Amino acid sequence: MHESSTTTKSYFTFFERAGLRLLKIFCSSPDRFVYGMKFLGFEDDRACRALEVIFGFTYEDAKMTVGELLGAPYVSNEKKSKTLSRLFREKFGQKLADKS
């Protein structure tokens, strides 16, 4: 997904946007992206927002992903809980099916 410049500009500071762009270049997978954001000092809610904007996650999925990667699990509904690998299989599996 492409990031929306108006959405990104209104939510993130100039330095955060620069950091996110660098992370997007060097960290192609969301798990590495999350670790990079935490290394740069992003708080959890801002990390979730970045996953929404850059990778197209829903807020719930972004919050679960950040929680799972950082050891603070967040599950609003156990039956709807998705791990990062399941999210990718669903997302990219659907794209591959659409191309066929």
Image: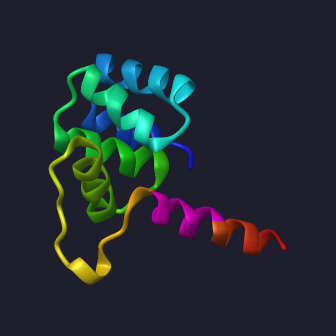
Residue 21: x and y in percent read 47, 25
Foreground residue among 19 and 90: 90
- Residue 72 is inside the magenta segment: no
Residue 32 falls in which quadrant of the image? Answer: top left
Q: At which x and y percent is residue 94? A: 64, 72
Please state the horizontal and vertical placement of residue 24, each as a whole percent of the image.
Answer: 50, 30
Characterize the magenta stretch by its predominant secondary structure: helix
Q: In this view, does 67 lie above or below 97?
A: above
State the residue at coordinates (28%, 37%).
10
Please state the total of marks drawn on the protein image: 0
Q: Between residues 18 and 61, which one lies in front from this camera angle?
A: 61
Side (left or right) of 95 relative to 89: right
Q: Residue furthest toward the right?
A: 100
Residue 14 visible to the viewer: yes
* First to last magenta residue range: 85-92
State the residue at coordinates (20%, 23%): 41
Q: Is residue 13 visible?
A: no
Going by the picture, which residue comes out furthest to the bottom?
79
Counting from the top left corner in percent of width and height, residue 52 is at 37, 51
| 91 magenta-colored | yes
